Amino acid sequence: MLHADNPGGTRTTTVPPVKQTQLIRRVTGLYKGFQNRTLLRHPENKTSKLRQFQRSFEIDQEPVVSWLKQRKEFCDGNFVGYDSLFALLTNVIITPEKGKGRRGGENIRDVLNQSEGDEYYLLEPGYFTIKCQDEEIPYSFQTKDHLINWKAALKIQKLFNVSGMTTVKTLTVALTRYEYVNMYHTMTDFYNAFLMMSIFKQRPDDVTILWIDGHPYGTLDVAWKTLFGHVMRAGELGEPTLFHGMVWNILGYFSPLNDHDSPHVPYLEEFREFFLGRHQVNFQRTLNCSRLTIRFIWRRDYVAHPRNPSGHVVRKIKNEDELISIMQKSFPNFEVIGSQIDLLDLTKQLQWISDTDILVGMHGAGLSHTLFLQKYAALIELYPTYWPTANKHFRAMAQWRNIHYQLWQNADQANEHANHYTYIPPDVVLKMVHEMQHKLCHGH
């Protein structure tokens, strides 16, 4: 329940998990007219029946429950902050001329060697405006969070005229993307947006994504349009625009998905089902121990962003063909293949991963696909001598999902070659695959 008003116009809400829907009545009321609309973009989409998109879905997992308890409301509810991580703004105006930055979406070849700083927006006071009878909003976000700058750009005014203004009525999740072409870091943004959608009880087609950045086109951009109803760039706003409801999303680096020491990540299986469902990829697959699928992810040079025009990447496997050949001879009844899957569109990547029983690859962002492996699957992660195993992004993902996991790190400098190629002894991988086969199929 709401406690009495505190000095400064702040109200603090503390509620048990079963009452969390009361916290979001304001925002769901704004969008109730969209709740039952026909899903035009994904008429057969499996996600519409997932439990997290049902009205009866209750938030009951940490740390989300704690975030909602640490709720502070200002300006008659037009600004609500949650645990200094994210905020919900109601009836907020964006004035584009108060933001300085590139439009974004350019072909990467047209902006090679562009400074990274050019891709981030400088926001002046008045970029955001909300109606507020208070003199100020005494609320702060976490250190190094760009939401500090967003709040500094938030203007409050007592009189509010929005007559005739361009309006976005669906819930808008606003975010700034960092390392926007990196699968791992983009996954933290996908996941955070999914959490916001779930917390505020919106269906995917009823969510607008607003990128407040000026990045050129990236291969993962299209995934946002598949996952959510609409995607906008701040650089595309040509006039003041009213947003009925806007969430300032959690910074990707602060995502639960980026806390590798945490024993648990909330709603991770629900996120997997949502992600695969929006791409029309099957959630489940039956394990067939008579014909396991062993797949290698190859890391190869490619141009991903303007700061790396040579396309050089590290942690590459030198003897790809040898590994495949030996595995095929050792497991003649199994399917053994390798792929540079970032050359595939994301839907094909997800299908490829969903059909994988044992995944093998060098430490790298592509192993973010661990999130989409079958629940019974296995991951074998390889490291060169120069890359510390303390980087445990994908080990953590495997542990969160209770997936079988092994790692190997090269200890022989003779296996390291020019241009960041590492020779992987075939007998090492063969032994680990045999062990994983036993773990997957023991008793089958």
Image (tube, grey):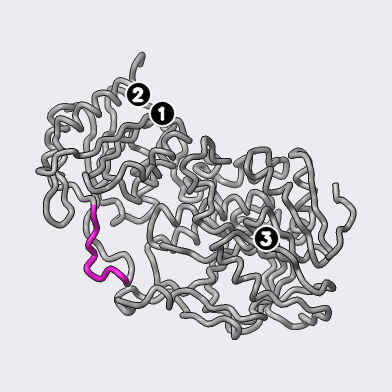
Q: How many marks?
A: 3
Tag in front: 3 or 1: 3
Q: Earlier in the sequence, mark 3 or mark 1?
A: 3
The dot on residue 376 is 1
Answer left or right for 87 relative to 435. right
**Residue 155 versus residue 47: which sits nearer the camera?**
155
Magenta-drawn segment: 307-314
Q: Amino acid at mark 3?
A: Ala
What quarter of the picture does the C terminus occupy? top left
Looking at the image, is mark 2 or mark 3 nearer the viewer? Answer: 3
**Cα–Cα gap, marks 3 and 1:** 37 Å
- For residue 87, the mark is 3
Give the spatial CA distance, label 2 vs label 3.
43 Å
Q: Residue at x 65, y 80 (%)?
A: 125
Disc 2 is placed on an element classified as helix
Question: Which residue is under mark 2?
Answer: 440
Identify the amino acid type marked 2: Leu
Number of residues whose C-alpha sits closer than 10 Å to that of mark 3, classed few (under 14), some (14–19) or many (20 or more) = many
Relative to 41, is 343 on the left or the right?
left
Q: Amino acid at mark 1?
A: Tyr
Q: Are marks 2 and 1 in contact (CB under 8 Å)?
A: yes
| x and y percentages locating residue 58 in the rendered image | 70, 40
